[in-house]
Image (cartoon, grey):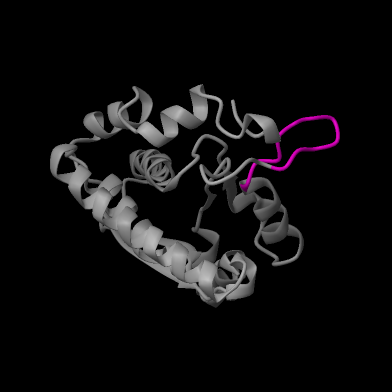
Amino acid sequence: ARCRAAAAFFHALPEAQRNATLVLVNSAGSLNGPNARHRDGRIVFESTPMLELLESSLSVPGRLLHGEFMSWDTVTNGLVARHFVDAVVAVWRPSEPLPVDVFTSDFHRDRTAEAFAWAMSASPAAPVDLTVHGAPTDARWLGGRAALEARLRHEEAGVEALRRRRKDVRTLAELQGFVLLGGHGGLRAYLHGGYNKSSGGGW
């Protein structure tokens, strides 16, 4: 649903704007569970099938697609996107704020908006006009209505946690340190602990 919403948005743009659009597809995976594996044991990164879908089935030109395989959670999604935006701004030198449209699932929209706003506003702030879109989710995809309601409670708690963190981590350097040097406890446990080891998904 996320990819289809993003592709529909892309194709609705005027041709000149489409040709000047770059599409970053976030995510190596999720802290909520192990990645799938290829038959030879290699990890299937979350962004890989999305890249394939966007180009092969949804007609987004491959030359505009950029995948990343570093981020494992919403905060890191935002940080990687910030680095991508900084690189674009450095090369393009736009005279106006750069429009940045983010597509995620509707149940995850508020937490994504909070994380990306944190990353883009970390000092020195990126010159962007940020919009976060939520694509409709079928509750059956999450295991039913009860599972969706549980996930929504998890998302609400995540938004509050992000707001608390933003008060202390205000600069881009501090945010980089928080993510990369161990301040992000969930990410640290996933990357360096035995998380989901029995399922082959941990590192």
Identified at 52% across, 34% down, the residue is: 70
As drawn, 119 above or below 151: above
Residue 20 on the magenta segment: no
Residue 194 rendering spot, x and y as whole percentages: 56, 25
In this orientation, which residue lies closer to the viewer: 29 or 198? 198
As drawn, 37 above or below 130: above
As drawn, 46 above or below 109: above
96 relative position to 38: left or right: left
Which quadrant: the N terminus? bottom right
Figure label count: 0
Residue 43 on the magenta segment: yes
Residue 100 seen: no
198 relative position to 147: left or right: right
Q: Quadrant of residue 8?
A: bottom right
In this orientation, which residue lies closer to the viewer: 3 or 107? 107
* Prevailing secondary structure class for the magenta stretch in the rendered image: loop
In this orientation, which residue lies closer to the viewer: 109 or 196? 196
Identified at 41% across, 40% down, the residue is: 76
Tell me which segment is drawn in magenta: 36-46
Residue 181 rendering spot, x and y as whole percentages: 34, 22
Q: Residue furthest right?
A: 39
189 relative position to 163: left or right: right
Residue 56 rendering spot, x and y as whole percentages: 76, 60
20 relative position to 98: left or right: right
Which quadrant: the C terminus? top right
Identified at 39% across, 58% down, the residue is: 154
In this orientation, which residue lies closer to the viewer: 68 or 138? 138
Residue 16 rendering spot, x and y as whole percentages: 51, 67
